[in-house]
Every structure is written in C-alpha cells, then in structure tokens.
Image: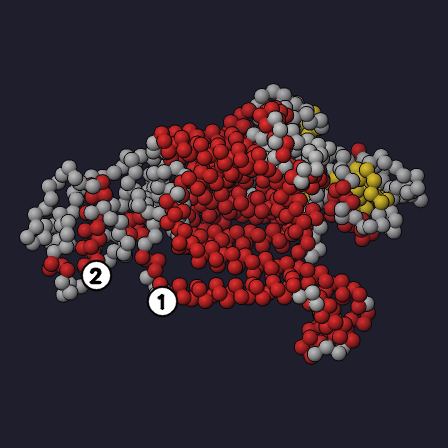
Amino acid sequence: MALLGGPAPGRSAPPRGRPGCRAEACVAPDVFLNEHYSTQRPISPPRAPLLSDRWQSSAVPLRLRIVDHRIDGFAHGRMPNLPLQGAQGHRSPKQRFGAEPGRGRGMSTQHPQASRISTKQNRRLVLLAILLLIAYGLVFGGGYGASIDEPRHAKFGRDTLRAYLGQGPVDSTAVDPVEHGPFYSFISYYAGGWVEAIHPGWTPTDGRHFIYYLSFVMATIFIWLLARRYVRAATAWLASALFFTQPLLLGHAFINPKDVPFMAFFLGSLTLGLLALPGHGSAVSLAHTAEFEQDDPLSAIDRRRLRRRLLFGWTLLTVAGLSVLWLWTGLLPFLHSVLAAAYRGEAPWPIQLAFNTVATDAYKTPLDLYAGKLVTAFVWIRGSTTFILVIGALFGWVSAAWPKVRPTILAKQDYLLVAGAGIMLGLDTSIRSVAPWAAVPLVVLYLLFAGSRRKAGLHILILTATSVVACLATWPFLWQDTLLHYAQSVLTLSDFPWQGIMLFNGQILSQGQQPWYFIPELMLLQVTLPVLALALLGLVSARRWLRSSQARVEIVLVLVTFALPIVASFRPGTIVYNNFRQFLFTVPAFFLLAALGLERIFKWLHSPRWRIAVAAIALLPGIIGIIRLYPYEYIYYNALAGMGGAVYSRFESDYWCTSYRALTEWANENAPQGATLYVGNGGLKSQVSEFSRSDLLVLGMGSYDDNHPPTLAVICDGKGRLLNVYPNAPVLMTIEREGAILGEVKDLRPQP
C-alpha cells in the first residue's frame, strides 16, 4: 500500500496537518507554489515518508520503485528529476511542471526550485531565430534609400569621436546635442562602415541601415522574452513573429536612425527589469528534467570529451585561417597570378574549368575588370570567414566556461538582470532623454514584489547607478553641467521647434494643428488588422486569464507605461509629425496584449491544425504587405484606412523620401554624361549624391548653375504635392506602390 499512499508495514502515518508539514507536501504538486496564487488545493500529505525494505529490494520492478521514490520526494519537498512511469493516474514531471503555463492562473506552473535559465531547446531556438533575422537583413538590407534624418545623424556620429579624443565638443551643426544623445548615431556610423567594407556592393548608407536593423532584431527577441513571461513558448514565438512581420516596423527598422533603436532599448530595459523580479514563476525558463536526456546515446564524459576536441579543432582552424587571411601578405598577389594564368588559359585544369564556366566570354572583357571583381570577392570572403571563425570560437569558449561560472551567475541572477536593465536604460537615455520613464514601473514593482525592503532598495540602487554611468559614458554633452544640460534636453524634446506641414485625413495641417486623436488613429490604421483583433481580445480577457495578483499588477503597469505618452500627446499644441514615428516605442503594448489574446484562442482550440490556421491568418496580412511594398514598407496602411491609391491621397506615404535612391539609380542608367540632377520637394542633396554617378552634378531645388543647364529633376512625394513641382515637365519614370506615386523623374531639357 506504500505505493498508493497508505502506511508501509511497521510504520504509522504522520498526523494530518502536523505543525512541521512543509508547503510542498500540503498542496497539490501540479500547482505552482507562489504566495500570490489563490488556487492552491490542500491535500493529504503522503503517509509513507520513507521507502520500506520491501520496496527497496531488488525483487521490486525498477519502474515501481521510481514511482515510490517520486511520492517520497514530494513528501520531503524535493523536486522530482526523473520521469514518472508505471502508476496509472499519475502525470509525468513535464505535465506537472512544464505544461501549459498558468492553466488560467497567468504564469508558469513551475516548481519554486526550478531554474529561471531557459532550456537548451529554447536557447537554440533563440540563437537560430537571431541568425535567420540577421541573414534576412544581409539579403534584403541593400535596397533601402537614405531617409532625410540619416545624413545629419551620420555626421553626428562622426563628430562624436572628437569629444572622446579631447578635440572639442560635439559639433552642434549636425544634430543639436540638446535634442538627442549620440550613442546609436556613433555606433551606426562606425559599425556600419565595417559592415559596408565586408559586404560587396553596399554603400555606407547600407551599412548604417544594417546596424539600425540589428536594434529591431533585438526588439523582436525582447518581445519574445516579455510575452514568454505570461504565455507559453509557442504563443510567445507567434507574438514575436507578428511583431517582426509588421510592414510599418520592418520598414522603419532599416531607415530610422533613432526611433527604432530607442524602442529596442526602452523595451529591453523594461523586460530585463521585469525578469529580475523574484517569486514570479517566470516562464522564461522551463523546469529541466531528465526527460530531455533520456535518448542521449552519449554519456556525460563522452560529451565533454567530444566538445573539448571540437573546440580545440575549431580554435586551431580559427588561428590558421586568420593567419592566412590577414598575415599572409602574398595571398592576394598569388590569387592575381592564378587569375592571370586562368585568363591566358594556362591554369591547372580544375581552376581553368571553374574560370571557363564563370567567364564564358573572357576574351571580350579586360583582365583589369576581372581583377577588380577578384578584390571585391576577396574582401567579402575574408570578412565573412573571419566573422564565422571568431564567432564560432567565442561561442565555443563561452560554452566551455559556462558550467564553471553557472552557479555564480545563478546565485546573482536577479542583480545581473537589474544591472542589465540599468545599462539598457542608460544607453536609451543617450538616444533620447525621456528614456528614464521606463524606470518608473520597475521601481514600483520592486517596492511591491522584491521580497524585502532591503532587496528592493538594492535593486533600485543598482538600476540607478548603472543607468547613470552608461548614460554619462556615451553622451559627452552631459560631461559638464550634467543636470542643467539634461533638463535642457528634456524640455527641448517636450516642445520641439519643428516647422513643416503634414497630411492627415485629406487635410494639410501645419505645426500644432493636428486633432487630439492624431496618434491613436494612425496607430489603428498602420498596424495589421489581426494584431488589433488579438490585442482587443487580450485586453478583454486579461483579467480573467491573469489570476495572479503580481501578473495583473505587472501587466497594468506595463500598459500604463506605454499608454501615458500617447495620452500626453492629446495636449493642444503638441508637436508631432511624420505620422507617429516618435511614438514607435509604445507599439510593443499591442503585441503583449496580442500574446494574451492568442493564448486565450489556443486554450479554446486544441487541434494543432486549427492553431496553425490561426497563426497563418494572423501573419499573412503583414507578409503580403512586406512583399508588395518593399522597400517602402513603412508607408503601410491597413484596410480601415481604405484601399488602393486613395489612401495615400489622405495620409502621408514616403515622407522621408527614401524613393530618391531608386530614382537616382534610374538616372544613372539613362541620364547623359555630365547631366545635372535637381533634387525637388524638400529632399536633401545628400540623399541623391551618395547613389549618383560620379559625372552627374547634384543640386538642390532652386540652386541653378549657369554653367550646367537643368537636365533632370528627381522628386519624391510624401504629401501628395508632385504636381506642384515642374507641372509641365514630361515624366520619364515613376515609383509606385499600391496605386500611390512615391516619386518621379522629370525631364527639364527644352522640349521641341
């Protein structure tokens, strides 16, 4: 009877409800033991605290002894770490601790002793997702034009180095240092130069675009982490996919030098700060049981030996590869000699065969042209190979060192997460000075749920100290008169002196004339419809789904953090422009609510086919919008705004004039030698000159040169004003998406 919970022979059952009864023995083991849950069910503790000699004998089948050991483990408060088998009516540890998070309680049903570090499966999926997203950026990142703000931020990043070198303050003619911090401008300028150097065919603008895009990749991962705190892993992945496939966000990811990075670091600081909360049963990790290791054919010793050999071999390969690629100065001349031999038909037969296959009409092309292509390919291959070798070696050494440092990291995990949140907050402040707003909900939550006043105070102190250090280290403008300069920045951003017009709902509005619902309406029109529906469902069902008081408080504070800046924009005279790009950092609220809505739907739908169908329906509008609008995805509007080109007669489209790149590339192929390009409609000369032929003269609108008569005009249309610029000039080429004209090339030469 010991197996069924009865008293073992010679033993008496412990009294029910005894004073020394542990919590794990007094509640159902499949309920997460957290003081915030109100659904704990008292049950009788197992009556057999120890195994009897009869059950320990070898005559008893192993599977039954495992079951009894399980029950005995629960009686003594130990977390089971072997799969439960052999007893009908009992569930496996995965079902007890790793199954559907919350079961209506809003958080993971993990055992309180379970580690908050994610399982190997989740870590590998996250790594794979990051690599796939980076690959997407490398493949499609070269087609976007420069936005109006990019040249100024590029100069700002370059001039920031002067402050670090002690050569003077940051040049305020690029971007006023009162307006923004230089952190991401600096990073995108220098890191973008490295990307451009190793990617053949890319311009400096393409390199910066890729660095902007990496911040969006980071935001996508943080969406997964934030959603995973409250829903299952599959639901969190779908919420992240919805975030990534928003045409508006993906379009901004490549061309926006400040708003997308600000959103990523704001979301990162908030997410890491939330993960540091103790006693939350965070779903970031799953209880790791022996079930994951059952089918492993290798022993622990064999795995360690294999990993060491692979790491040693990869390290040797890295050292040898880097030595050949970077230290052997004769490598490129050697390749040139091989190319020359192949061009003459004198190379060894494998090389000659490959050359003849690639260059079928080599005699028609001079050798110098092939030499130039060889140099380009060599630079790209050397950079890519170096990246792969170094990243692989670093990953291997970190993996090898992880078992040794893991106990220390786990012991200080909460403090490390708070420090990470503080660093993200400080860097975000160095992008836009209003970032400390993200610290408000974290401070409140630490005071409520940190566990003790001492721990709450320590969390707040670490958050404050790390954010201040990170901000001061990356913003030279604050090195003198720190508080005064920071106050000036906040005041400037709250009342930014912008002069211009905007198109909203068919009306041309000037500064401060927009209605109070300007931001909310544009948000509803530029997010895909499935996200809106899921967010509404999540908002309606959140209170019922999240029965944990801590989960409800967290969700409310996070939503309030995102909503209050939007409410503040209702104030008459508030300066907003370029649709709602300054408020992109509030968009993640939609996807947190959408994750809750998806979790509710998946609770209703048990069939995998129906769940896949829901996922496809949710993702399809965004994917179609990306395909049809590329590379102008940021002009996306959903069906609520209307259909076809009529939408863009009521709302702004390419307000940053990124279509100048495609217009200029057409002019490169069709303009006569020495032609003059006039940049019209408020665009910048630098948006065209970087992509133009070297013989073309690029001038701003109205900057006529008597020695260079007008030839062509490249005109972008973000506010429906194309007809106002050279209305009688013939149109040679048009950029069009979804029936909207984004730009034109007009012929300014005298007509016969």
Q: Quadrant of residue 412?
A: top left
The answer to whether residue 432 is left or right of residue 339 is left
Which mark, by number, is residue 297?
Answer: 1
Instruction: Kindly identify the residue that appears in the image at 29 percent across and 49 percent down.
Output: 96
Instruction: Kindly identify the residue that appears in the image at 29 percent across and 52 percent down.
Output: 93
Q: Is residue 349 above or below residue 680?
A: below
Element type where label 2 sits in the image: helix
The N terminus lies in which quarter of the figure?
bottom left
The answer to whether residue 230 is left or right of residue 710 is left
Number of marks: 2
Given the image, on which type of amino acid does mark 2 rest? Arg
Element type where label 1 sits in the image: loop
Give whichever of 435, 583 is nearer the camera.
Answer: 435
Around disc 1, counting alpha carbons within 10 Å, would you say few (fewer than 14), some (14 to 19), or many (20 or more)?
A: few
Q: Is residue 582 above or below residue 281?
A: above
The answer to whether residue 37 is left or right of residue 441 is left
**Label 2 vs label 1: CA separation?**
21 Å
Given the image, on which type of amino acid does mark 1 rest? Pro
Q: Position of residue 649 (x, y in %)?
A: 69, 34
The residue that disc 2 covers is: 63
